[in-house]
Amino acid sequence: MRKLLQSQRQLRQKRLAAIKKGTVALIDLGSSKVMCLVVSLSEINQINSFSTGKSDRGVTFRVIGASTTKSRGIRDGEIYEMREAESAIRTVIQRAQKMAGCLIENVFLTFSSGTQKSTLISSSIEFIQREVTELDIGHALSKVNLVYDDLKREIIHALPVNFSIDDKHGYMDPRGISGSKLSVDVNIVSIQSDIIKNMVTCLNKCDLSLAGLALAPYVSGQSSLLEDEMQVGVVCIDLGASSSSISIFFRKNLIFSESIKIGGQHITSDIMQAFQISFLAAERLKVLHGGLIPANSDDRETIELPENNTDLYADRRTITKSELLGVIRPRVEEIFDSLRIILDSSDFEFLPGQKVVLTGGGSKLANILDFTSIFLGKPTRVAVPMRIQGLPASTHGPEAAAAIGLALNLAQPQDELWDFKAPFEHEGDELIRRTWRWVKSNW
Amino acid sequence: MNLLKSNDPAPSRLYYKINRLFYRLWFRLVLIIVLLVVSILLSKKFLYKDIDLNAEIKFLSEESSAIYKDLTKLSITRILVKGAQESLKKEIITLIENAATEGFSALKAQALREKIEDIRKVKKAFVKFSTDGLVIVNVIERKEAVVFFNNDLYEVLDSNGVILFIKQNYEGLSTFPLLVGKDASKNINALLALVNEIGSYKSEVLYYEWVGERRWNIHMKSELVFKLPENDLNKGLNVMRMFLRETNKLSEAVVSVDLRNIDKPIIRFRKAPRVENIGKNIRRLAG
């Protein structure tokens, strides 16, 4: 626990130092594309946190550089080829740097991993009837049992999602409320530690320093969901290239997150195999002619397949649209079937809000809105991420939701477990620190 | 995803690092310095390969010192002094010649002008050098105006009261009005105006006395003294001129004419000799 707090706080310090420098880069390391936004930051007075030791100042930002390139060496959100991944990062960084006209040193990273796991852990403390203080919150959070079955996992997010005082639930800020028992529910999101290690190595090879980390399903939700939706409960489905993830928000907190290793690239791969065409041609076919809801005209509508060979006398092959749909739909059904299983296991049906929001590049597929609402039986919408200052119009789409969400998260980060002081941290040096504070205030 | 190009060129590691370094100011400065040094060395190697830099620097320093040497020995061929009398001309020429031997800095027009203006008889001087070694000096000379008798010495002053020279006797100074009295030298202009007003009678004046730092007494050669008023000087002078014109020879009997109160002039006569003494004198003359 102590080690986790120390490492995460070091990352927080790096984040603050990067914000002070004024310019940071946000990288969305996806399986199909790598996106980089360079944001210029300036601090404003805004109280958005109640934890001790955290800056009371918010941050405003403006995008001053943006670039996107095809992803290389990354599969299922993991680095498979270090050199290729490094060259992809170098490409986006150099372009964004050129556009922004400044040197990028600190990087905030977001990615989606098939290995992510979300666990809701509760802990409670009891005390004599009195008002709850920040120390009590820290005490309750320090009691969270962070022992895993798998030691090779790394915690990315530990979000306190619900506070309860004497069996009364739903407190967002329990400070000042009287009670004798404080319980806290923490959503722990973890991934395999090797993935992060590889990513840090890759960034170091590009002369970059990691200043912050966030998972794509979490930040995509932050950029795509409306406040009301997040308050009453909503499920955000991020349809990525190699993985699809679910994140459930309730009372503006991420309460559940899970992902599966099937995404848009699998659909493309299916098309490629079914019609024996190149991957790029299959991708083009999916984007231009793909769909999910069959129509009567589909049998008559023919699509000419692009050929790889240069034989002019060979007959050009054509397929009907219903054939294409016949390839796409089963895979999409498979994705949504898997997602429904996860959704059912997450007790989403008990939340007051039952809305489904689609985001990510896969949500651009034609008729996916109708398909999802029929398939999941819930009201659905395709989200376009929040508009942020300075973002080029070409990069403003569902596929940029993670990068934009990362920017929003950077500006107003949510309190996490390591933002509160644990009681064991007060033991040793607290006396010296108190004395120093007293001397400083009375000097 | 169709926006993404499959053949997106990735920068090489070296190019990427250099590109990042270019955003650092220190790197740019170092690079500029290195480029300058390299370009100097290359130009030395290929363009000016016969040039020995050390020899060049030595040559340049020697050249510059030779030029300076010539300048310090600037020769003066002729000195032309305008607007001065012979004695002053000689003095100025001697001064310039002495200055030429002192060094280059002494031959600056400004320095030379100041030196010339230090001569008492020089009111203003203009010095001009020409390239062929000619020095032209235009001088405005101070003119002798009055002689001031002070501490048994005769000081010759100009109209501004500047002492031009001092003599121990009055010889050769009779053409200038003689002035006596405490602080009289401060009123040269008033005296000159007075002398001008006296007109043709100024030849009969022995000296002018500044009395009590406020008014004039005019001592005539006939031992007659005119005590001029303090305020109505012109009126007093008119009376004086009239007196001299009208009395002519009779004035010998008069010792002084007191015009201090111009409305009531006082004329003091010489004391008449006693009758007995006159008889004695006549007898002696008669033998």
Image (tube, coloured by chain):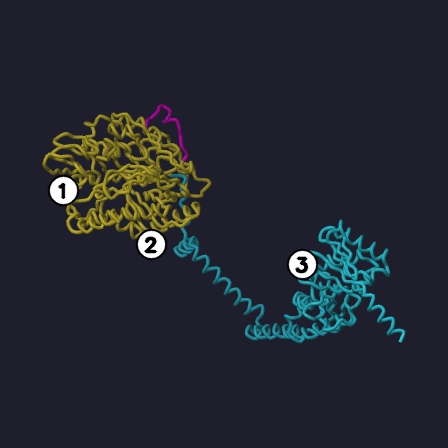
Chain colours: A yellow, B cyan
Whether residue B143 is visible here, answered yes or no, is no
Amino acid tagged 2: Lys
x and y, in percent, of residue B22 in the image: 44, 54
Residue under label 2: A205
**Residue B205 as seen in the image, left or right of residue B57:** right
Residue bounds of the magenta highlight: A292-304
Residue beneath disc 1: A143
Residue B212, numbered circle: 3
Q: Residue at x 14, y 29 (%)?
A: A168
Q: Helix or strand or loop: what does disc 2 sit on?
A: helix
Picture coordinates of residue A216 (x, y %)? Answer: 29, 40
* Disc 1/disc 3 C-alpha distance (Å): 115 Å
Q: Tell which subunit mark 2 falls on.
A: A
Q: Residue at x 26, y 34 (%)?
A: A335
The answer to which quarter of the image holds residue A294 is: top left
Q: Amino acid at mark 3?
A: Gly
